[in-house]
Amino acid sequence: MRLEGNRVLSDDNKVIAEKERGYGDWISRDDSVSISDILDFVNGSVVEEVEVEETEMVRARNEKGHYIADDPDTPENEAWTAKVVNKFLGRK
């Protein structure tokens, strides 16, 4: 594919998509190519996968397994901590 003005052309010079006049939206002229693929090509965006951790808040415990109390003299709450529940690949 290549971009020529307001048109996206295939290697054999067939119009795959073109920009609509007045609105600036891209319209697909070829059913075999999705509009999201065309927009990715035009915008040059590449989707990057990153590792994402899903966490939840749980009560903090010491080495013996006992709950840790909150110290009221500090601004943070030491009684709660974040625990990783799930790691997965997400999109950036």
Image (cartoon, rainbow, N blue to C red):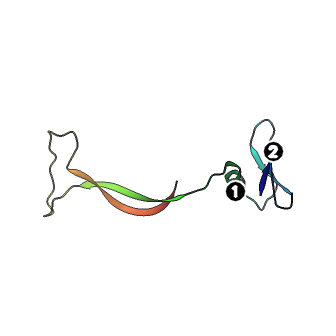
Which residue corresponds to the image point at 71% horizontal and 50% vertical from the top-left?
42
Residue at image mark 2: 5
SS of the residue under disc 2:
loop
Q: Quadrant of residue 19?
A: top right
Q: Secondary structure at mark 1?
A: helix
Q: CA distance from mark 2 to mark 1?
A: 18 Å
Report the side of 37 relative to 56 (left or right): right
Name the side, left or right, on which 45 lies relative to 20: left
Residue under pointer 1: 37
Q: Where is 8 relative to 24, above or below?
A: below
Residue reaching furthest top? 22
Residue 31, quarter of picture: bottom right
| x and y, in percent, of residue 79 in the image | 20, 50
Q: At x 34% / y 60%, what residue is drawn? A: 84
Q: Which residue sits at x=86%, y=57%?
A: 14
Q: Amino acid at mark 2?
A: Gly
Report whether 90 appears left or right of 78. right
The spot of residue 81 in percent (x, y) is 26, 53
Query: x and y percent of residue 47 in the render?
Result: 58, 56
The image quadrant where one finds the N terminus is bottom right
Which residue appears at 86% of the width and 61% of the height? 12
- Label 1 is placed on what type of residue? Asp
Crowding around mark 2 (Cα neighbors within 10 Å: few <14, some 14 to 19, many 20+) is: few
Label 1: how many Cα within 10 Å (few below 14, some 14–19, many 20+):
few
